[in-house]
Amino acid sequence: MEEKKSSSQSQNRSSEKSGEKVRFQANNNYFTIAVYAIIVITIGAFIVRAILSFEKTVAGIKSIINMLMPFIVGALLAFILNPAVKQVMIFLEKVCRLKNIKVRKALAIAITYVLLLGFATVTIFGIVPQVVTSLTDLINAIPAWLDYIYEGFDILEERFPNLDIAILEQAVNDTIPDVINTLRNFAANIVPAIYNLSMSIVNLIVDLVISIIVSIYMISDKKLLKNSLKAFIYAFVPVKRIPTMVEILKECNNIFSSFVIGKSIDSLIIGILCFIFMNILKLPYAMLISVIVGITNMIPYFGPFIGAIPGIIILLMISPVKALVFTLLILILQQFDGLVLGPKILGSSTGLRPLWIIIAITVGGSIGGVLGMFLGVPVVAVIRYLTNRILRYRLEQRNFKNIDSLTLG
């Protein structure tokens, strides 16, 4: 080594003496440092700009999510329907004795999506008309509720002569013209509203068709997608890190998919149970309220209570006793879901504390509405898992004890 250095120095000196220019020799280390510096500076600039113009950043994220919504819904459908496709393939193999895997997969996908379309058809033509009828009945019941209010004022005035009822009556009388004007404005704008609704329905149908096509391709090309992901991992991840990376990806997939599938099944069961018990207890608007309860139940912890509020308000206008019975029913269903049904279906799929769930629901709802509130929980659960893996690795390197108490709860 010393001989090589002395020879190179002597060559440089001889070239300087002879007046020749010394050529620049590339250094890979300096080049790598420069590339990393440019990447860090660029990412830092994007982060600073995103923070300084936070409203524009949120608006941009929302527009990107809206643009990608068919693909997001398609991925969700693929996550939810993939276990069903697997079960149908097992049935076709063991019962129907189909040995050709391509034919078996095609038939399994076709049968699963036919069942899905059948369920959607029953929902549209069986449940939606009842929901619309319930909403119509609620609107038509407004005059009767006003009569009940005025009768209540008369009863209060008879029992409490010193009570000034005129203020309450004046408030109601002032509110009625506003309601009438709102209905008139709605009637005047009914044609543009129908046009906008029609365009929204067309866009929704187009997005739904795209989502179904995307989900079919994702399920049919599942092996190809896995191989593509493996190719990226083996190409860019250091060899000694590949087993850890594969383990992390599998765990993230288990957390996300198990929550999405399990919570969907759990919410469907809770909605059906709510409908059955409301009919047994002879509570009105069972279909409308059960649909609300089933949809909002997909939001962990707080979903049942969010869904109970509209039902309590509706039944309170009809009968306080029925509203109380419905409240007790929701409490019983929530306890059953939390103690029996949820642990059976979901297990510890997320393991999130209520604080993280509140953060996930708040941030997800502000970005993606109801769907964002639902997806925010598994996304935060995956982020928590990745953060804990990093913290555990760093703490183990520093030889900390009681690592579990130092990671995220």
Image (spheres, grey):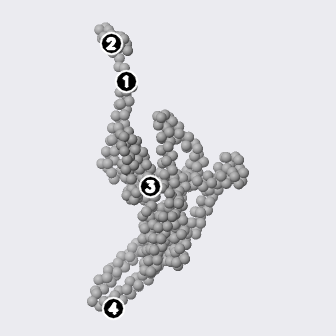
Mark 2, Cα crowd under 10 Å, few <14 / some 14-19 / many 20+, is few
**Which amino acid does the dot numbered 1 rest on?**
Asn
User: Residue 10: where, in percent of width, then height?
Assistant: 33, 10
Amino acid at dot 3: Gly
Q: Which residue is mark 1?
A: 27
Q: Is residue 108 left or right of residue 276?
A: right
- From the viewer's perspective, tell me whether residue 305 is left or right of residue 202: left
Mark 3 or mark 4, earlier in chain: 4
How far apart marks 4 and 2 lie (CA) works out to 113 Å
Mark toward the start of the polypeptide (1 vs 3): 1
- Relative to 239, is 158 on the left or the right? left
Kind of residue sitting beneath label 2: Gln
> For mark 1, does the 10 Å Cα neighbourhood hold few (<14), some (14 to 19), or many (20 or more) residues?
few
Using the numbered discs, state the Cα–Cα distance from disc 2 to disc 1 in whole angstroms.
18 Å
- In this rendering, the count of numbered labels is 4
Along the polypeptide, which appears first: circle 2 or circle 1? Answer: 2
Drawn side of residue 45 relative to residue 113, left or right: left
Of residue 60 and residue 25, the one placed in the foreground of this image is 25
- Residue named by callout 2: 9
Q: Image point 51% across, 58% down: which residue?
A: 346
Gap in angstroms between the C-alphas marked 4 and 1? 97 Å
Name the residue beneath numbered marker 3.
351
Q: CA distance from mark 2 to mark 3?
A: 64 Å
Percent of width and height locating residue 301: 43, 62
